[in-house]
Amino acid sequence: MKRYLLAFFFAAGLWGQQTITFTVRKQTVLAAGAEVVTVQQPSTGAKLVRFIGAYFDCSVACSFTLERNGSAATSTALAVNNLNPGEQPPTTTAWSASNVGTGSVIWSYNCAAACSVPIDLTGLQFGSGGGTGTNLTLRSNSITGTVDIAFKFTETY
């Protein structure tokens, strides 16, 4: 009986949490340049972030890296959008043409020609207290072409 009560109270606590899905997207036309898009925890008030996936599209041959935990980005702010408008606003921030420091490279990708690469980020998450050094970045190499970068993730309140 005690186990059932414990399970009930645990489940009731989970029902009180709200999980909201967000997206970040940036399309950039580059002329001998690179694009760097970063999703980052705020300095205070961070929530648990669980990544679902990312998407990288390049109109020409290119390479790019997925990096984690570079020094904090401070420019240029990019909108974080609620998948379902009207829900709670995000605590995470996003940055394009990001000045984030190079983090630990999780994976490197190479495209011999134009490519579209969906990236499964299941299992990658930010704790609720990591600060601005907790971030995830997609970084293209310098190209002349169009790059499209997107992230999808949830925050738990």
Image: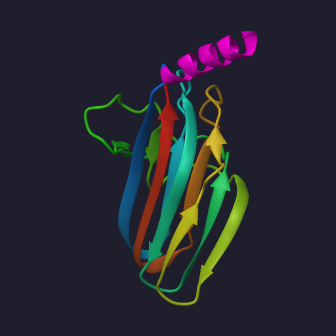
Q: Is residue 90 left or right of residue 111?
A: left
**Magenta span main SS:** helix
Write the residue at 38% across / 43% down: 80
Q: Is residue 14 above or below residue 25?
A: above
Q: Is residue 33 above or below residue 46?
A: below
Number of numbered discs present?
Answer: 0
Q: Position of residue 59 (x, y in %)?
A: 41, 82
Q: Residue furthest front?
A: 1
Please state the extent of the stretch shown in magenta in the rendering: 1-15
Write the residue at 35% across / 28% down: 88
Q: Does the rendering let one see residue 112?
A: yes
Between 127 and 64, the residue placed more toward the observer is: 127
Q: Position of residue 1 (x, y in %)?
A: 72, 11
Between 100 and 156, the residue placed more toward the observer is: 156
Q: Residue furthest bottom?
A: 113
Between 18 and 110, the residue placed more toward the observer is: 18
Write the residue at 45% across / 48% down: 95
Residue 5 magenta-drawn?
yes
Q: Position of residue 121 (x, y in %)?
A: 60, 56
Q: Is residue 70 above or below residue 44?
A: below
Q: Does the rendering let one see residue 99?
A: no
